[in-house]
Image (cartoon, helix red, strand yellow):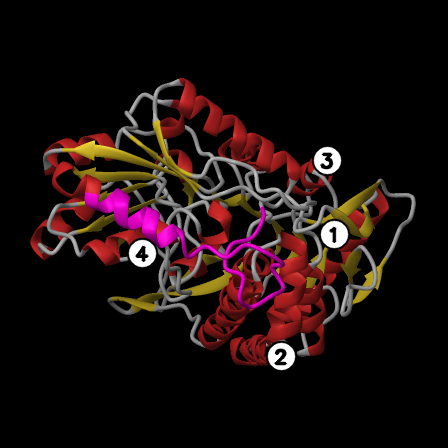
Amino acid sequence: MQNQPKASHFIDGAYMEDTTGEVFDVIYPATGEVIAKLHAATPAIIDKALDAARRAQKDWAAMTGTERGRVLRRAADIMRERNHDLSVLETYDTGKPYQETSVADATSGADALEYFGGLAGSLTGEHIQLGEDFVYTRREPLGVCVGIGAWNYPTQIACWKGAPALACGNAMVFKPSETTPLCALKVAEILIEAGAPAGVYNVVQGLGAVGAALVSDQRVDKVSLTGSVPTGRKVYAAAAEGMRHVTMELGGKSPLVIFDDADLENAVSGAILGNFYSTGQVCSNGTRVFVQKGIKEAFLLRLAERLAGVVMGDPQDPAVNFGPMVSGRQRDIVEGYIAKGLDEGARLVYGGKRVDRDGFYLEPTVFADVTDDMTIAREEIFGPVLSVLDFDTEEEVLARANDTEFGLAAGVFTADLTRAHRVVAGFEAGTCYINTYNLAPVEAPFGGMKQSGVGRENSKAAIEHYSQIKGVYVAMGDVEAPF
């Protein structure tokens, strides 16, 4: 495999290895082959990364925001120039088709670096006049940030966390998922090449124990996790011990509501993007598709016709548009949910089976006649399984859409824009869509309500989660005291 990272970790501006760390395999999901062996970070590696970040952060924060922004924008340019190689690596890491990674992964990471690079010089405080006296505020970095990534968007997540952290003058230690560990190393390499000081962005590898060591370390000021709700609860609790700042981007069981008057073709497209892109391995997926009864059969028929356009095969082939699951374990989990759907009486209308080829392939799967109490309608599956639920009225569907512990995303398709705005106002979800689904431009805030997370990624909102305000009262006259 060309252009592979040179070692397991990237610390203080260079690749680093400690062969005493536990070995784990990197498996190409399309074939099941081992394509790399990495070593988990030892305590010595973790120490080096955190010490490097702590040292480098002071010098990085002392630069002007414009200077920091220049580095991030340069990194964005390099990332775009190398989009092909980075997309090939992402496909090896995740199994996602090159057709997808070439337009949605390194490009999204570059967008984040460019956007926050552009914002960096504008991060100022404010002046508050109080008669003759006044207060001024300083926007200051938090210090050392730890990022913990998920396996579905390794390049994107490394940048979504790194770009705002660095723009605000922080340093970062990033731990990718052990399932997809390669791409973040290239992000670190590019940032150094773009002029970031050594130690400002470090990558360490490992499983849960490495993450636990990072989030509980006294040198860490902020933790940002993308992952599941159970992992989020553990990480949040560990971070709270040290009063660390926290951003949690967790899972969902998001509703996609389709009214009778919706444009059928667009609604089917939205359901495909919200269930089958990345082989269904997207946290914001609209996996509970509520279809008003008048168009239910037409929707199911057109969806089945469109699924005939699925092209499976070698994900490095640009003609392929549907890849394998990320791992054998994840495929087993999803197959377990398909079996539960059948056991609980859902009607299987498409797919549901393994594909007879190497790798971790599973057919796109559609269930109809799903009810709110079925397991496939309650629990996050994280695979290519779409559940269609019937509904009659707007009031009814809004109550059912919100009847979940999650609140990451929600969408509505309708020709009635007054109703569309009314419904999204009623959704208990942080990221909502009208007549589209699953777009995540860096300019827009992304994040959840309820059990789906804390804080927001992207947009100007992310700056609030990677910086803090210092207020300074300035007296212009004498000081009065009671005695």
Whole-percent x and y of residue 89? 67, 63
Relative to 335, residue 264 above or below = below
Q: Name the residue under label 1.
A: 204
Q: Mark yes or no: residue 237 visible.
A: no
Whole-percent x and y of residue 379? 42, 29
What is the spatial separation of the Cα atoms under label 1 and label 3, in whole angstroms?
Answer: 12 Å
**Residue segment shown in magenta:** 298-324
> Would residue 138 be counted in the magenta stretch?
no
Amino acid carrying mark 3 in the image: Ala
What is the spatial separation of the Cα atoms under label 2 and label 3, in whole angstroms?
Answer: 33 Å
Amino acid carrying mark 1 in the image: Val
Q: Do the residues labelled 1 and 2 touch (CB within 8 Å)?
A: no
What's the mark number on residue 269? 4
- Which comes sooner in the sequence, label 2 or label 4? 2
Circle 3 — which element? helix
Amino acid carrying mark 2 in the image: Ile
What is the spatial separation of the Cα atoms under label 1 and label 4, in whole angstroms?
Answer: 38 Å
- Towards the viewer: 245 or 74: 74
Relative to 341, residue 357 above or below = below
Q: Quadrant of the N terminus?
A: bottom right
Mark in the foreground, 4 or 3: 4
Whole-percent x and y of residue 371? 28, 25
Amino acid carrying mark 4 in the image: Ser
Tell me if mark 1 has few (under 14), some (14-19) or many (20+) residues whose alpha carbon lies within 10 angstroms of its own: many
In this picture, residue 286 sits left or right of residue 279 = left
